[in-house]
Image (cartoon, grey):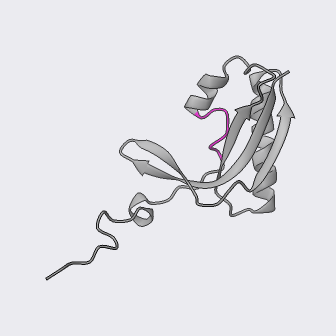
Amino acid sequence: MPTLCLSAHPAYLIRRGTQDVPILGRYRETAREETQVRVLTEATAAIGGFGARVRGADPEASFLISVTLRADGRKPWGFDAAYLDGSLGHMAFLHRRDAAATLPSAHAGQRRTP
């Protein structure tokens, strides 16, 4: 039976063109958990439950859930597609930020010389 390794990492979403892009924070993971799953619905439930527990500890937190599998099992059918389209739930706990407010200017920190 596959074992999912879940970890929460501080992060937020910004809009770049037509895509939402997750930006990881500077801090390490805030929580970690392992759980065994057989099918995709169990995986999404485990990820949602983990995220809810992390959010319960810090209601204002914005985080990305990293999902890896131990080498002792195979991914449930449909796992990769769910990861790519976001239906796995690993990005459900991200807050959106304005890209202009969070990204430094290309010239930030540079001094002008006369």
Q: Quadrant of the C terminus?
A: bottom left
Q: Which residue is outermost to the bottom?
A: 114
Q: Residue at point 53% right, 55% down?
A: 96
Q: Nearer the viewer, residue 29 or 15?
A: 29
* 13 displayed left or right of 70: left
* Quadrant hosting residue 72: top right
* 79 displayed left or right of 13: right
Q: Is residue 61 above or below residue 43?
A: below
Q: Is residue 43 above or below residue 29?
A: above
Q: Is residue 57 above or below residue 87?
A: below
Q: Which residue is outermost to the top?
A: 77
User: Where does the image place residue 80, in percent across and percent down from the top left?
Assistant: 62, 24
* Quadrant hosting residue 27: bottom right
Magenta span contains residue 81: no
Q: Which residue is outermost to the front?
A: 113
Magenta segment, prevailing SS (helix, strand or loop): loop
User: Where does the image place residue 76, in percent across and percent down from the top left?
Assistant: 74, 20
Q: Which residue is outermost to the left?
A: 114
* 77 displayed left or right of 46: left
Q: Residue at point 29% right, 67% down?
A: 107
Q: Which residues are magenta?
A: 86-92
Magenta span contains residue 88: yes
Q: Quadrant of the N terminus?
A: top right
